[in-house]
Image (cartoon, rainbow, N blue to C red):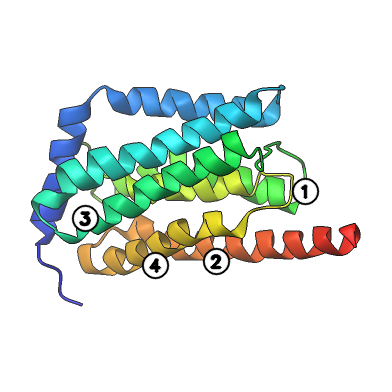
Amino acid sequence: MKTPFTVDQFLGVFRKYNLGVFPMQISLYLLAVVVIYLTVKPSTRSDKIISGILAFFWLWMGIVYHLHYFTEINNAAYLFGAFFVMQGFLFLIFGIFQYKLSFCFKVNRYGITGISLVIFALFVYPIMGYFLGHIYPDSPTFGLPCPTTIFTFGLLLLTVKRFPPGLLIIPCLWSVIGFMAAFQFGIVEDTSLLLFGLTTVFLLLIRNRIEKRYQL
């Protein structure tokens, strides 16, 4: 599928975004560290705090990146932005108002896979990008859609209650879009998106089925 912009224009959006929002990238990393700490050392309010931070991440990507920056070269970004904002509100609804999300790192296949994806998104992803020639500011930093979607997949695997499947739809759709863009624009680190998305869906749906069976 032919895109309405070139690779240089695509990377140029990263540059404009990174220079325009700096030092917000540091704040986003610090919020991610808070989230990790709260999954390891949960408290009575940690679930709502984590859900609120996830909601903020997706609202940030939808409004700031897609609607403010990406629309300069791609009209489809208006649709992307709307879906990302919707995902942000879903985290608010399910995580804060309905209290259906509970996060805790446990040493099992869900916890180990989840924390691995979180570490990949925060540390391995940018290191891979650097060695592949995607050097700041012309690189997708944390807080941009692809690494933050991987981070989200990791956190969803750290949930411990029966999971609302609807929360997976938009991240999974983006994993497909990001996977296709990886080949078109040479963002090789994004090829992991689809694999991580499929892994997350598989594990969470299996866990939901097991928990439903025990509830019967």
User: Which amino acid does the dot numbered 3 rest on?
Assistant: Ala
Can I make out residue 192 in this image? Answer: no
Q: Is residue 124 above or below residue 195?
A: above
Residue 209 location, x and y as percent?
77, 65
Dot in front, 2 or 3: 3
Give the labeled residue for mark 3. 77
Task: Kindly check if marks 2 and 4 are in contact, taking CB atoms under 8 A apart as contact.
Answer: no
User: Which amino acid does the dot numbered 1 rest on?
Assistant: Asn
Residue 151 location, x and y as percent?
49, 44
Q: Residue at x 65, y 41 (%)?
A: 101
Give the labeled residue for mark 4. 176
Q: Residue at x 54, y 24 (%)?
A: 34
* Dot 1 crowding, Cα within 10 Å, few <14, some 14–19, many 20+: few
Q: Residue at x 36, y 58 (%)?
A: 190
Q: Earlier in the sequence, mark 2 or mark 3?
A: 3
Q: Quadrant of the N terminus?
A: bottom left
Give the labeled residue for mark 2. 198
Count numbered badges in the picture.
4
The image quadrant of residue 170 is: bottom left
Q: Which numbered tag is attached to residue 108?
A: 1
For marks 2 and 3, give the CA distance: 24 Å
Q: Nearer the viewer, residue 89 or 136?
A: 89
* Dot 4 crowding, Cα within 10 Å, few <14, some 14–19, many 20+: some
Residue that protrudes farthest toward the bottom in the picture: 1
